[in-house]
Image (tube, rainbow, N blue to C red):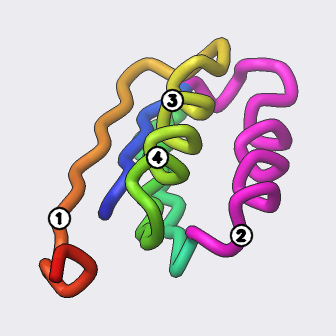
């Protein structure tokens, strides 16, 4: 899956909170990309894998952080675990 976040670069300690949450879910995170969109906004794209509930928990925790302006979770499946 992919979690995308747009957040306020100036929100106090937000980047630290995003990073701390990611460390707590390190087994689900494959890769992250951080983009400086403009002076005020950053985009974080997080590639994830694992159980849907764990991935949703991470996405919901990130979305709930003060200063996150937009959050989206897109999930897919190989279907292997369904058989």
- Magenta residue span: 8-28
Upstream in the sequence, badge 1 or badge 3? 3
Question: On residue 53, which mark appears?
Answer: 4
* Viewer-closest of 69 and 52: 52
Q: Secondary structure at mark 1?
A: loop
Disc 3 target residue:
60
Disc 2 target residue:
26
The quadrant of the rendering that contains the N terminus is: bottom left
Disc 1 target residue:
76
Residue at position x 47%, y 57% in the image = 35
Upstream in the sequence, badge 2 or badge 3? 2
Q: Secondary structure at mark 4?
A: helix
How far apart in space, not on screen, are marks 4 and 2 (Cα)? Answer: 15 Å
Upstream in the sequence, badge 2 or badge 1? 2
Query: Is residue 26 magenta-colored?
Result: yes
Label 4 CA crowd tier, 10 Å (few <14, some 14–19, many 20+): few
Label 3 CA crowd tier, 10 Å (few <14, some 14–19, many 20+): some
Q: Secondary structure at mark 3?
A: helix
């Amino acid at each position: 899956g992919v979690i995308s976040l747009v957040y306020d670069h100036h929100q106090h300690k937000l980047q630290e909170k995003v990073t701390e949450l990611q460390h707590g879910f390190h087994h689900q995170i494959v890769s992250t990309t951080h983009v400086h969109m403009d002076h005020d906004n950053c985009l974080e794209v997080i590639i994830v894998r694992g159980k849907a509930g764990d991935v949703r928990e991470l996405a919901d925790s990130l979305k709930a952080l003060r200063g996150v302006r937009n959050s989206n979770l897109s999930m897919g499946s190989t279907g292997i675990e369904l058989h």
